[in-house]
Amino acid sequence: MVNLDSLIPHLPVWILVLFRLTGLFMYAPLFGGLVIPARVKIFLAAGLSFCIYPMLLTPGTASADHLVPVINEGLSLWSLASVISAELGIGLIIGYGSSLPLIALQWAGRSISQQLGLGIAEVFNPGEEQGRMLSQLFFLLALAGFVSLNGHLILFSTLIETFQNIPLGGFGVDQHAINLIVGLLTSMLHVALRIAAPLFCLIFLETIVTGFLMRTVPQMNILSIGFAIKILLGIGLLMVAIGTQTSVLVEIWFSTFANLSQFFSPGSLPSVGMW
């Protein structure tokens, strides 16, 4: 008969590791989407926790120094809920922060669709979300860039490093975390404007030109061809500017990864004991 009594002290600490991973699978790109079933996410998080937990107990590492006293002394049942919330928050911050560039590209695609007049598709198909075509296109391009840059590996590396820098139960949401989220949201808006601004300027100039033609050549029915011209100009500009947009996307990905890694680096975040 197998004796499992020696594993019982490890169970509460392993649960905390599992919840830190679970937060990442809720919002992270590629893993937080609805395409992956929830059951698969649970099995992935559990499997990774079984792989990561023995690594944290390696003698001489900072994580082992944090975990061994907890394993020996145990956890208080009253503090377990707050500690689980803190561990879940670490994964959520990394996952949500890394998904903001995708949200920025979707917002830019929706804005471009509205300016090009592609929202007319909603009239013919009311069940179709307005601006879905370009928004989905930008989202897939951003997701492909995320995978090509090994973003999924960087996210897992950042999360594993948090075990070395922040002990289990040693994280608290304070002004530093709020500043990080606000900074990432500001960067998201900045990127969306950088992607959509060239087309906004083109549409503005096209509107001025068509208005001038309507005044000077009233016999010409500009409205009948104005929408087609606007769409052709917009698509042409998107094809020409795809290289610049790709460089902007790569820049924001690396900036996001750097900000998340720096936030959880030693000395940048004060620990808050929760035992």
Image (tube, rainbow, N blue to C red):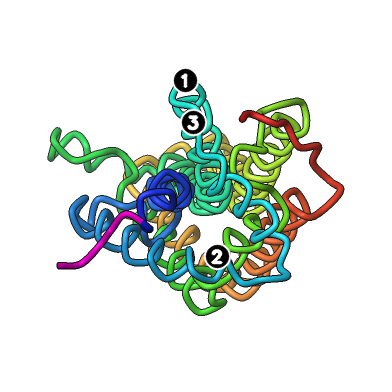
**Residue 21 seen in this snapshot:** yes
Specify start and end residues of the magenta stretch as a single range.
1-5
**Residue 206 seen in this snapshot:** no
Q: What's the residue at 26%, 54% (across, down)?
A: 42
Q: Which residue is mark 1?
A: 78
Helix, strand or loop at mark 3:
helix
Q: Amino acid at mark 2?
A: Leu
Q: Quick one: label 1, few (<14), some, or many (20+) residues within 10 Å? A: few
Q: What's the residue at 62%, 56% (across, down)?
A: 163
- Depth check, mark 1 against mark 2: the one in front is 1
Residue at far top of view: 78
Q: Quick one: label 3, few (<14), some, or many (20+) residues within 10 Å? A: some
Q: What's the residue at 63%, 44% (across, down)?
A: 188
Q: Quick one: label 2, few (<14), some, or many (20+) residues within 10 Å? A: some
Decide if residue 35 is on the left or right side of residue 78: left
Asked whether 2 falls inside the magenta stretch, the response is yes
Q: CA distance from mark 2 to mark 3?
A: 46 Å
Q: Amino acid at mark 3?
A: Ser
**Disc on the earlier residue, 2 or 3:** 3
In the image shown, does 83 or 236 lie closer to the viewer? 83
Identify the mark at residue 237; answer none if there is no mark.
2
Q: Amino acid at mark 1?
A: Trp
Helix, strand or loop at mark 2:
helix
Whether label 1 touches label 2, CB < 8 Å: no
Whether label 2 touches label 3, CB < 8 Å: no
Q: Which residue is mark 3?
A: 85
In the image shown, does 157 or 142 lie closer to the viewer? 157
In the image shown, does 156 or 253 lie closer to the viewer? 156
Q: Position of residue 58 (x, y in %)?
A: 61, 72
